[in-house]
Amino acid sequence: GHVLALSGGVGGAKLAAGLAAVLSPEDLTIAVNTGDDFEHLGLTICPDIDSVTYAMAGLNDTERGWGVAGETWQAMAMLRALGEEDWFNLGDRDLGMHLARSWRLRAGETLSQVTTRLTQGLGIAHAIVPMSDDPVRTQVVTADGILDFQHYFVREQCRPVARAIRFDGVPGARPSRPLAAALARPDLAAVIVCPSNPYLSVDPILAVDGVREALRNRSVPLVVVSPLVGGKALKGPLGKLLAELGAEANNLAIARHYSGLADHLIIDEADAGDAEGLRALGLSVTITGTVMCEANDRERLARVALAA
Ligand code: FO1
Ligand code: CA
């Protein structure tokens, strides 16, 4: 049967790459968060689509966690010399991606069509699809006003105190055609939620018109791979944001967050103590190593998720 994976960047991208390594292209659709997208210097930047794309093409920078490995920064140096905005680091190779995407969008292609074009251009046979072709923008409501996610996260370095997260554009954003098609497939066998941040990376996907309902009414298992290891987010200074919003960083909170959706939670060995409480909530649980350092780890975790 067909597997639908929901993914954000970084952690999600690693499992998505693992799933692609063990499933044929006909058997997998990877639907990606576009809430982190933004317009910058006249370009449309889609960080999570690019994280998944670069991970699947083997081009991702594993140190930094975003962008292309072996990147150079000549264009940034010129922007800086020109006195233009330089707070968002666009590598030279990465810029090529944004140029290609932006002009194809301007020429009238949908984000789904552009993403298919660009991923195929990099030799990726599996379907990486945006959650929606309509713009959805994650925003952080702060004491100093509403900030687009990248402005909050990168430009302001998460400094303003957060009051709420909102997704501008929903309701009203329709699922992309390939996401809607995957949700409606009669041979859909499972939905896997990759180890991405539930509040920032998965919630925007669930907020797209009809997606949460479709997943709630599905008849196939929904497996969540927890993004936590030892009760901590694996990457990023997002702990501060989530604490300010009162979101707890533990697997029980994650299970409650996905209640009515998740059947099975995969948690890290470091959090084995959570299993009992999760089972009491009616979930089945797999305990395994969830840290993905190498291709082997990604594929192994992908197999564990499929077995679940
Ligand atoms: N993150 C940063 O912390 N600083 C950057 O300058 C930066 C640039 C950047 C460029 C392209 C891209 O695809 C991602 C980039 N990111 C950067 C990461 C991005 O902000 C995050 O990956 C997510 O949106 C949060 O998960
Ligand atoms: Ca992200």
Image (tube, helix red, strand yellow):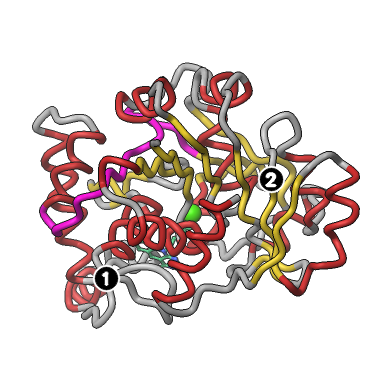
Secondary structure category for the residue under label 1: loop
Which of the numbered marks, if any, corresponds to residue 119? none
The quadrant holding residue 264 is: top right
Q: Is residue 11 left or right of residue 217?
A: left
Kind of residue at disc 1: Gly
| Secondary structure character of the magenta stretch overall | loop
Q: Is residue 150 visible?
A: no
Whether residue 37 can be seen here: yes
How far apart marks 1 and 2 lie (CA) works out to: 29 Å
The residue where tag 1 is placed is: 58
SS class of the residue under badge 2? Answer: strand
| Numbered range of the magenta stretch | 121-137
- Is 269 on the left or on the right of 62, as rendered? right
- Residue under circle 2? 264
Front residue of 261/264: it is: 264
Q: Residues within 10 Å of mark 1 (few under 14, many from 20)?
A: some
Expressed as whole percent of the image width and height from the top left, the position of residue 120 reads 14, 50
Q: Position of residue 54 (x, y in %)?
A: 29, 63
Residue 69 vertical position relative to residue 199 in the rendered view, above or below: below
- Count neighbours of disc 2 (C-alpha within 10 A) and say few if under 14, some if 14 to 19, many if 20 or more: many
What amino acid is found at the position of numbered circle 2 in the picture? Answer: His
Residue 68 drawn at (x, y percent) = 28, 72
In the rendered image, which quarter is residue 295 located in? bottom left
Which quadrant of the view contains residue 135?
Answer: top left
Question: Residue at position x 74%, y 44% from top?
Answer: 163
Q: Nearer the viewer, mark 1 or mark 2?
A: 2
In which quadrant is the N terminus drawn?
top left
Q: Is residue 200 magenta?
A: no
Q: Earlier in the sequence, mark 1 or mark 2?
A: 1
